[in-house]
Amino acid sequence: MASTQLSDEEIFSELKRFGFTPGPVTENTRPVYLKKLKKLREEQQQRGSRSSKTRSSGSINSTAGDGSTAASRPVSPDVTHLSSSRRPGRKSSVLGFSSDESDAETPLRRKGLEHSSKANRSSGFQKQQKVRPLPTHNAAIKVQYGGGTRLNSNFSPGSDGQRSVSLGWGVGARSSLDSEGMHYDESADDDDCEDETEKNSCSLNGRGGSRLNNNKLVGEYSDSDEEEVGGFGAGERERDGLEFRRGHRIVPFASHVVERSSQTEEKNSEVKPLGGVNMVKSRGEVEAEDEAKRRDLDPSGGSRSNRVPRKSIYLSLAENHGGKAGENNHVDSEDGTSRSNSTSRFSIGLRPRFSNYSSLSQTFRDNHSNHTPAPNHSYSQAVLKKKLSVPEDELLQQFKREELASSSSFSAHYLSMFLLTAACLFFLLLGLMYLRMRGTGSSEMDGTIKSHPFGSDFDSSYNKGEKDVILKLLLNLHDHLAFIAGQHDCGDQQHPNRSLSMDEASAYLLTQNKEFEGFIHTSLEWIIRTGQDLGIRLTGQVADDPVTEVSEISRLESTHPKMPFQCRFRRAFLTVIVRVLLIAAVVGCVWSVVCYMRYRWRKEEEETRHMYDMVERIIDVLKTHGEAYQENQDLQAYLPIPHVRDSLVQPQDRKTMKKIWDRAVNFLSANESRIRTETQRIGGADFLVWRWIQPSLSCDKTSLMPSKVWQGKAFPLDRRNSPPNSLTPCLKIRNMFDPVMEVGENWDLAIHEAILEKCSDNDGIVHIAVDKNSREGCVYVKCLSAEHSGKAFKALHGSWFDGKLVTVKYLRLDRYHQRFPQAQGCSTPLKASSLHMSSPMNTARLQYYGSANSSGFS
Amino acid sequence: MTSTSQKHRDFVAEPMGEKPVMALAGIGEVLGKRLAEKGFDKAYVVLGQFLVLKKDEELFRDWLKDVCGANAKQQGDCYGCLKDWCDAFL
């Protein structure tokens, strides 16, 4: 677009032709209006009409206007380029997963421009946005198989990996036949399917699609290197699946899933009881047939599960597969190896889509290996491993990995919960068993005691009967003692003593069995002889003495008390609880200590920050006071510390800030060299005061402001705001300085220089006079001729100088001479001094910057 | 306008007088400095530009962006501030 040739008026009229009433087109607003014009034109073009770029009436541009706009014109293309370059950046950001900000921004700004190109992208973008919260494996899958068939690409638009595969499968088949750009159909379908209300249609889609696809799969399979599909109708295969599912509910964990799936089946079934026929048939089939069947099982299962509420879809799907896997395993084990062949070969996954399910079933098989029968599992694994040499195994591996991730992400929750509960139950059982074992002991009271710890001597010394008797005696004794000890430990009041005296023991044993009488001593001897702990401790008269002779024995005690189960459990429970509480208490203590430390540390930091803040404020106050003192010697050079505090800190904060204040004071006295702490007597009372002892630096403030530079033009000069021709050779320039603010001695010379610089192309300035006392900052300039003054006028009028807008007026020559009689004789043009030669570059640059516009200034 | 900042409210509360350009809502130190360099050192100068653009939102925002690089939020704040001020005082 030839924007550079459009003048202001042309832009104005062009915009008006679009029905848009613009404001004045000036230096500042030009780029804005150019953009608007562009936009309007493009909109118009899109509407189908061509906008002619006829220039309207030949515009009469004043020379002044031309001169100024020429200067500004180089800016506007740059500006538009800049803005247009900024736009693509935003556009491209929309393509990816950009943030919402740029989304909100772009529609606001450039709706028309990106209209058509964005349509596709935005819908795709929204699609992706929807997909994004879903498992990212979809994207990964898509990436992998991006180069693959169209069917594969169905993964990404799908809402959830598993379900959409089945759906997209059907949908994608159709789309693959259609043209390439059916992306929206797929997404539309998937959109539909995301709603629960439309599940039926979705599943129908899936089902119909599956039927559709089966026929098409034949063709597709023939294209690829894969084995051919048999000619089974989809319906039969589905029925097979149903049969399989219904018939086998062996796997316990999948049973409830199976029931659920079977429930759904019953609800929506079109089942025909082909059952056995199909099973037989399938058994005898070629692998491909089984494969195809397997394939149909999965998607049909998937489509079926669409009807289940959404959340459980994942579970049911996942566990459907698991169930199927389990069932398949069992079926295989029942029906022989053909099934496992099929599953394994299937799991190799000639069609990547189906390897999805296979890998899922794989994972479930892996996960629940403890439930599946071992031989089948290992067999299928072996077969699987053998078959992995197929070239596609790499892809499969990757696919499986992602599928693992996906399946785990789906069923992770349920799986982990299940495993957790299983583990807990297991440990609980274990503990109970242990307790029970320990508590009850072996019940071989009357059985012959085979093993004894007495060694071979024992066997040799006595004959069998005696041995039995002795051993039985010992067992009885042991049990009785254990019982007593147990009772005692459990708090039973009947047995105040844990141990049994010799007499009591003998009496008990005699009551048990008359035969024991003779053997009591011998058995006790044997106990002493063997050094092991048999569960009976023999204590002598004096406690803790090792007993060597039977006669020394006075008391017997059991070392393995036998307690009733509840007692045992209770004690164990209490112990555990106590220990746990102890640990918790310790952990709690440590954690609270850590928290406290952190809190303290944070508090410290904050306080230090406050302190530094306070220090800075004090320094500021003192500095200003010091400077005020320098200007006005009436004040005191120092400030009492409490006064400073009271001026800086609010009354309500004084108590809370006291600590910070003190720290600040200490900091200042220690670290600040510009402030001296003294004690002074003020009004009869002693005060600690601060004195600012740094001599005031020469205004660092004023260095910030641009001093004495030209800053560009406020408005272009054209007919409206300047006289058409220069009237007189004399100019009065207003608002170049503020006499109050000026410091230094030679600032008027600086102004001279500045004017000369500005009009450096103009060789006609002969006299400059700065009226130092004028409130308006007037400068009088005389030129050689009206023409020169006209040029100077154009250069100066409406420019910014030192932050002030400069205005120029023509003065009558005689008035000028009245005022400045010395100017009458001047005829040599003044030149800017060479000192300022370096800065003209800067000022020249500044002149070309766009600047403010004030309307109607003269 | 859902909610306005304190700066906005302060600005719209009274005639702007000689307030610096940084008193405008959305214009902070950096932007204010840039505007001042271009010559818009007082708020009324920016008001002038706003009025020249006929109080058109899009044009003013574009212009503001071009002149000092304000982002969308800053543009919106400034525009809203000036608009409200005009509604109140103009």
Image (cartoon, coloured by chain):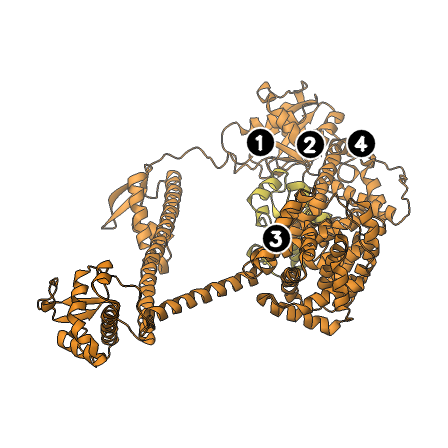
Chain colours: A orange, B yellow
Q: Residues within 10 Å of mark 3 (few under 14, many from 20)?
A: some
Quarter of the rendering occupied by the C terminus of chain A: top right
Instruction: Inspect this view and state whether residue A36 appears.
Output: yes
Q: Please give the chain letter of the residue carrying mark 4.
A: A
Which of the two marks, 3 or 4, is nearer to us in this view?
3
Q: Please give the chain letter of the residue carrying mark 3.
A: A
Type of the residue with mark 4: Thr
**Residue under numbered circle 2:** A848
Q: Residues within 10 Å of mark 2 (few under 14, many from 20)?
A: some
Q: Nearer the viewer, residue B76 or A160?
A: A160
Q: Are marks 3 and 4 on the same chain?
A: yes
Question: How far is the residue under mark 3 from the one under mark 4?
Answer: 97 Å
**Residue under numbered circle 3:** A379
Q: Nearer the viewer, residue A501 or A44?
A: A501
Residues at circles 2 and 3 in contact by the CB criterion of under 8 Å: no
Type of the residue with mark 2: Tyr
Of the two numbered discs 1 and 2 on the same chain, state the one appearing first in sequence.
Answer: 1
> What's the residue at 68%, 66% (across, down)?
A245
**Residue under numbered circle 4:** A63
The percent position of residue A188, horizontal first and vertical second, equals 78, 58
Query: Can you tell which mark lies on residue A192?
Result: none
Of the two numbered discs 4 and 1 on the same chain, state the one appearing first in sequence.
Answer: 4
Vertical placement of A646 versus A796: above or below? Answer: below
